[in-house]
Amino acid sequence: QVQLVESGGGLVQAGGSLRLSCAASGRTFSSYAMGWFRQAPGKEREFVGATRWSGVGNTYYADYADSVKGRFTISRDNKNTVSLQMNSLKPEDTAVYYCAADHDSLGTPDLVDYWGKGTLVTVSS
């Protein structure tokens, strides 16, 4: 049974940092795209960032939403673990953050293969 388990959410002041981690189990995700979406209250789930396999060895490419570029860094720690370092957090970053994995590109939430249950990030002003 495939599981994605997030950790690291919490409450932080604006300008602060948090690091989220996601551990996947139940299969090997080496060729899968893994990354993060978020959903704020009353809003649709949106893409945050992803790591996508280059097709060669253990090389992955990172991609980000414009709203987090320069502040968030996504990393593929190993074939089944992905992390999100969030710096310079803003109140508008407040949301439930979901880990996701997909055999394709992880571009749209409607086509994601696997989801975690989510972890809440609250940024106070």
Image: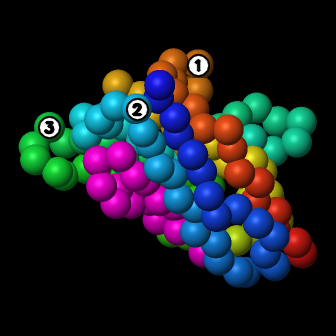
Residue 82 vertical placement versus 37 (above, below): below
Q: Does label 1 or label 3 sit earlier along the sequence?
A: 3
Secondary structure type for disc 2: loop
Q: CA distance from mark 2 to mark 3?
A: 22 Å
Secondary structure type for disc 3: loop
Of 57 and 15, nearer the camera is 57
Residues drawn in magenta: 72-87
Q: Which residue is mark 2?
A: 26
Residue 59 percent coordinates (x, y): 18, 52
Residue 88 percent coordinates (x, y): 65, 76
Residue 27 vertical placement versus 62 (above, below): above
Residue 2 vertical placement versus 95 (above, below): above
Q: Which mark is residue 110?
A: 1
Q: Amino acid at mark 3?
A: Gly
* Magenta segment includes 81: yes
Mark nearer the viewer, 1 or 2: 2
Q: Residue at x 29, y 47 (%)?
A: 79
Would residue 76 be visible to someone looking at this image? yes
Q: CA distance from mark 1 to mark 3?
A: 24 Å
Query: Which of the image's four quarters has the C terminus?
Result: bottom right
Spot the residue most to the left: 56
